[in-house]
């Protein structure tokens, strides 16, 4: 009878110094894991370098060629074009005009003072 044990019989014990846990970073655009070699951080958001694109034209962006407005990223030409087309940031980028909020506040103020 052989008293030798096979590696399958004994559980492997690893050193605790190698059991550190790393937090997986997730791309803000696609939701998949971002590895260090493909990691890009813009406005405190993490992206794959291939997922960091203009919202308007889908052109690949880099840290020197983007403009951000309220969490949306644009290439600089489209950022300027969208602003110039309407003359303000709200209407040009598809949001309610800020002056509509003022009108609503004024209407509330008039009814409250009466």
Image (cartoon, rainbow, N blue to C red):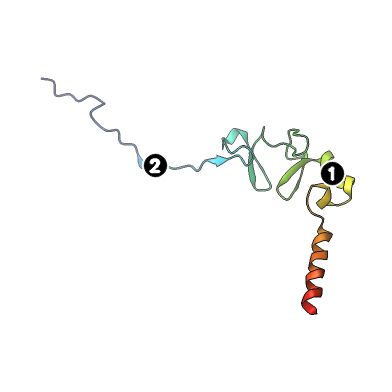
In the drawing, does residue 16 fall left or right of residue 5?
A: right
Q: Which mark is residue 17?
A: 2
The picture places residue 65, in percent across and down from the top left corner, at: 78, 39
Give whichever of 22, 45 is nearer the camera. Answer: 45
Image point 36% across, 42% down: which residue?
A: 16
Q: Position of residue 31 (x, y in %)?
A: 59, 39
Q: Earlier in the sequence, mark 2 or mark 1?
A: 2
Residue at the far top: name it: 1
Marks 2/1: CA distance? 53 Å
Q: Residue at x 55, y 41 (%)?
A: 25
Question: Quarter-wise, where is residue 112 in the image?
Answer: bottom right
User: How crowded is the residue under tag 2: few (<14 C-alpha within 10 Å), some, or many (20+)?
Assistant: few
Please state which of the two labelled residues, at mark 2 or mark 1, is closer to the viewer: 1
Compared across the picture, whether 9 is left or right of 96 comes to left
Q: Position of residue 38 (x, y in %)?
A: 62, 33
Q: Is residue 50 above or below residue 41?
A: above
């Amino acid at each position: 009878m052989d008293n030798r044990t096979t590696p399958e019989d004994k559980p492997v014990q690893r050193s605790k110094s190698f059991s550190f846990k790393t937090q997986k970073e997730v791309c803000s655009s696609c939701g998949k894991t971002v590895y260090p070699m493909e990691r890009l951080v813009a406005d405190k958001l993490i992206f794959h370098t291939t997922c960091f694109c203009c919202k308007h034209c889908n052109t690949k962006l880099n840290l020197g060629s983007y403009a951000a407005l309220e969490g949306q990223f644009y290439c600089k030409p489209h950022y300027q074009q969208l602003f110039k087309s309407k003359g303000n940031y709200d209407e040009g980028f598809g949001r309610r005009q800020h002056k509509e909020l003022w009108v609503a506040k004024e209407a509330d103020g008039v009814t409250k003072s009466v």
